Amino acid sequence: MTGLLQEPKTEPMRAPVPAAPPSRTRRTLPEDGVPALLVEHVTKQFLVGRKRKPVTAVKDISLRIRRGEIYGVLGANGSGKSTFIRLVSTLLTLDTGKVEVFGHDIERDEMAVKRLINRVSVDAAFFKKLSPFENLAYAARLYGMDPKSARQQAIAILARLGISEKRLGRPLEQMSRGMQQKVAIARALLTSPTLLLLDEPTTGLDPRSKLDVQSFIEDLRDGHDATIVLTTHDLAEADRLCDRIAIINDGRIVVEETPEALKVLVAERHGQEPTMESVFMTFTGRSLDDDLDNENDENDEG
């Protein structure tokens, strides 16, 4: 850990539960038990030059995500969303704070954590000369999966995402951006992760592919024992999919609640339209596409 000077700690605003019935039914999730993801006072800085001050990408973030929850993280470009996901997935080291995945500390129990999680990013990496099935077979072997079983699961997952078996032999470099992202999601799901980290999984997808992915996420929520952390630039997507949403601004969580409660908050307390657009603008003062000049997430746009 580094000897960083800590800014005064402030708790994110908790919005009141709306009195009116929600626009759609949300699942009731248990409050007790070991959380799927526990984050306590996590901070991450990057050095951007010898004569420049370190840039703080994540500032004293704390949150608790229940098992089976879809938890959304919203923020403008450069707000720290993707840095947060990379910290949880062990791709970056913590400067200060603690992260636990189902009770396993990500620093002390790194290998146990890696068996429980998988990540899909907006810029997923592949062996582009290989086919979707060859990429998935490689991932399956890394996790010690039975080849026959892995093939059957891969075919089923890809079919649900709109990729037929006859396309499994085509090199990935010949496939569209949307198809490649679906393969990335299938690769992550193949290992049956207990915690799935989706970092802008539908960014840049065509409307049909976006709907396919969103519907599949809903299927995971309703039919599988998976907890999902979702970062997205699509406010309608967050409203549709997420049980709770945290908004990050300048590396801090500034508000956290259900989509319905957030909309009630901006309407009743701030006199704004009860929409996710109003929620986002109220708590960040910027649009989702704005870049933050003082952010450096190692070329991270999240």
Image (spheres, grey):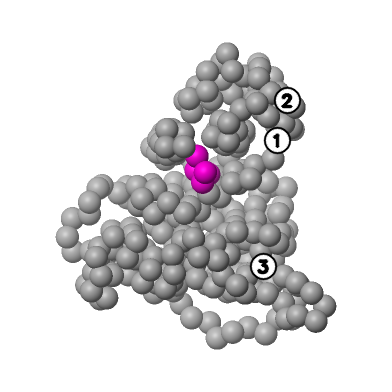
Q: Amino acid at mark 2?
A: Leu
Q: Residue 37, located in which quarter of the rendered image?
A: bottom right
Q: Are marks 3 and 2 in contact (CB under 8 Å)?
A: no
Name the residue furthest right: 50
Judge whether residue 96 can be spotted in this image. Answer: no
Gap between marks 2 and 1 measured at Cα: 8 Å
Query: Which residue is at a point 65% across and 56% down the rendered structure image?
Result: 86
Residue 108 position in % (x across, y down): 73, 58
Quadrant the N terminus occupies: bottom right
Residue 246 lies, with reference to residue 250, above or below; the image says above
Residue 194 lies, with reference to residue 29, above or below; the image says above
Q: Residue 50, located in which quarter of the rendered image?
A: bottom right
Residue 78 position in % (x across, y down): 58, 64
Secondary structure at numbered mark 3:
loop
Q: Which mark is residue 200?
A: none
Q: Are marks 2 and 1 in contact (CB under 8 Å)?
A: yes
- Give the class, few, some or many, for how many residues have Cα within 10 Å of label 1's Cα (few <14, many ≥20): some
Count of numbered badges drawn on the protein: 3
Residue 191 position in % (x across, y down): 62, 34
Q: Which residue is mark 1?
A: 126
Q: Amino acid at mark 3?
A: Asn
Judge whether residue 290 can be spotted in this image. Answer: yes
Query: Which region shows up in magenta?
Result: 201-205
Quadrant the C terminus occupies: bottom right
N-terminal label among 1 and 3? 1
Q: Amino acid at mark 1?
A: Phe
